[in-house]
Amino acid sequence: MEWLKSILDEPWKPVSRPALGAWLVFYVAFMVYAFSAHGGLLFIDSANLVVHEGGHNLFGWFGPTLGLWGGTLLQWLVPFLLAVYFFTQRQIPGFAFSLFFFFENWLPTGTYMADARDQALPLVTTGDPDFVEHDFHAIFSSLGVLDYDTKIGAAVRILGFCGMIGVTLWLALRLKAGNSGQPVPVAFPQPAISLVQRFPGKRATAAPPTVSNANSAQPAPKSDPGE
């Protein structure tokens, strides 16, 4: 928690308002483009496909099950880990870009999921094409949810759009704030303050007056024995 608090207390590195505005225009235009595709593949998905196939090869070292899931795992992990890195560096453009395309990866994944029964999408593999299989046909079949492929795919796509909208709104709030370098307020406990600072109208209780023992220290007058 202390490590996380130290990161959150760090201000974001400043970005000019024109740059933030340009990124906002780009993200809004991309979402319009993605929505108008109606589930079709986008130009960025060619790069996502390379990462996806690399995930099968990478996680395949840990067994066939992880190898099957590995394509989607690496496809999501790469932009997510980049977002975490840019978050720790407090770089707004890199963090927003990585997180935005982390959620964008949910769109082709949802389309792929919805195709589990029909298997109409063209499949790509880095191995022998005679042994190519549909990832989510195999995954959903093993989980017993193959009949819900279209519902699961639609839900994943909706969540992807919600995530992209959320990132865009966050960036718009940074632009509206005017100073993009200000830290995001976090509800962490604040250090205690003294009562004098908390109640400035009240003064501290005065110390009791010091009693002088000067008189008591003087010897009592002696009586004259002649009197």
Image (spheres, rainbow, N blue to C red):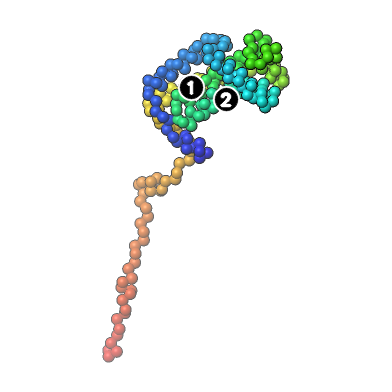
> Spatial distance from mark 2 to mark 1, Cα to Cα?
14 Å
* Left-right relation of 213 to 95: left
Residue 221 is situated, as x and y percent measured from the top left of the image, at 29, 81
Q: Are marks 2 and 1 in contact (CB under 8 Å)?
A: no
Query: Residue at the spot x=51%, y=26% of the render?
Result: 83
For image coordinates 52% across by 38% down, the residue present is 1
* Callout 2: SS: helix
Q: Is residue 63 left or right of residue 195?
A: right
Q: Nearer the viewer, residue 170 or 51?
A: 51
Q: Is residue 114 visible?
A: no
Mark 2: which amino acid?
Leu
36 shown above or below 164: above
Labelled disc at residue 97: 1
Q: Badge 2 local density, few (<14 within 10 Å), some, or many (20+)?
A: some
Specify which label sits upstream in the sequence, 2 or 1: 2
Q: Amino acid at mark 1?
A: Phe
Residue for badge 2: 77
Which quadrant would residue 15 be assigned to in this image?
A: top left
The front one of 17 and 217 is: 17
* Residue at (35% x, 51% y) in the render: 203
The C terminus is located in which quarter? bottom left
Residue 216: quadrant of the picture? bottom left
